[in-house]
Image: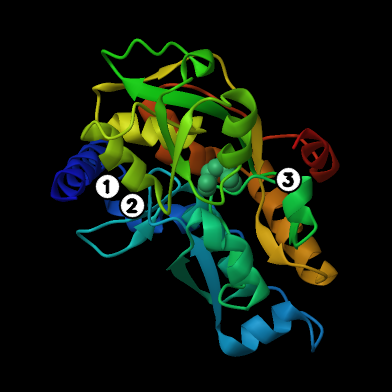
Amino acid sequence: MQTTRWRWLAVLALALGMLVAAGCGDDDEQAGSAATATTEARTFAAGTTMAKLQDEGEITIGVKFDVPPFGFKNPQSGEVEGFDVDLGKRIADALGVKPKFIEAVSDNRIPFLKDGTADLILSTMTITSERDKEIDFSEPYFVARGRVLVKDDSKIAGVDDLAGKKVCTALGSTYEETLKKQAPKAELRLVDSYSECLELIQNGAVDAISTDDVILTGMIIQDDSLKLVGEPLTTEPYGAGIKEGNDEFQTFVTDVVSEWKQDGGWEAAYQKWIGQFTDEEQDPPTMTLAEALKLN
Ligand code: GLU
């Protein structure tokens, strides 16, 4: 636990150092809203979820707390930050309300929407037809790929080598199914949060971790004795999760996501949280919700 925490601090120091070097250290706090400067709070008809949230002055958003670079609770500042968090701030800005970020791990994302604990989920959540039966999604705002992570000296070269191996992933994630299908003889270790998987591979209790590439890359940034192996297993389009049957709110969130992808906000967040670490360029996804639903 302690080791991981210190590693996060190191990552954070690195990230802050890079931002300062890039001459934008002072603007860091504003970075989420810099790209949203043009966003103005809109007016909504009484009775809509948007109007209710405006009355309350706050929107509760479930994000990951231990998944840099998407959702991460910075132990120094106590602030929650990352790509999903920037999108959450953008949606809150469009409503003119304060975002309140709460932790939503993989397995409680859908229950949190159903019981009203969260108004919105932005938690590295893949759009799937199974999940779509219980909740609604915005259009895709990011597309990840499923991968396998091992220690540098591991002989595992991909998903086909996982038979008889201990493999960690999160309870309630898409990888429960993926691994059952693609590595039926692997011994699955299902945990609540990805930081637990990281600790388990570091102390040798599991041989591999499987989940989205961006989550695994976040682990490699924390621990460079880990590496990705094999070909991508799956395509995982991320959507904002919304309580089922609230069409107006779904349209509103999708509109904000579309604007964010078109006006440079997405690129700024991508570069800040992902691009600068991976040196990879990426465009905002063009996949539609209907296409995403056909994939998984
Ligand atoms: N994107 C996958 C999912 O929604 C894996 C990541 C996660 O568990 O948050 O299940």
Question: Which is more N-terminal, label 2 or label 3?
Answer: 2
Confirm if mark 3 falls within 8 A of ligand 1.
yes
The image quarter in which residue 80 lies: bottom left
The image quarter in which residue 121 lies: bottom right
Residue at point 64%, 49% (across, down): 260
Question: Which is more N-terminal, label 1 or label 3?
Answer: 1
Verify CB contact (< 8 Å) between mark 1 and mark 2: yes
Residue at point 55%, 14% (across, down): 231
**Nearer mark to the viewer, of 3 and 2:** 3
Confirm if mark 1 falls within 8 A of ligand 1.
no
Q: Is residue 242 above or below residue 200?
A: below
User: Which residue matches tag 1?
Assistant: 25
Give how far apart the Cα atoms at labels 1 and 2 are: 5 Å
Say few, some or many: other residues with alpha carbon within 10 Å of mark 1 (under 14 / 14 to 19 / 20 or more): some
Ligand 1, image quadrant it occupies = top right
Q: Amino acid at mark 3?
A: Thr
- Image-based side of 189 in relation to 115, left or right: left
Q: Position of residue 67 (x, y in %)?
A: 40, 47
Give how far apart the Cα atoms at labels 3 and 2 are: 34 Å
Tell me how many marks there are.
Answer: 3
Residue 128 is tagged as 3
Q: Secondary structure at mark 3?
A: loop
Q: Is residue 117 above or below residue 121?
A: below
Q: Amino acid at mark 1?
A: Gly
Q: Amino acid at mark 2?
A: Asp
Res 6 visible: yes
Q: Secondary structure at mark 2?
A: helix
User: Which residue matches tag 2?
Assistant: 28
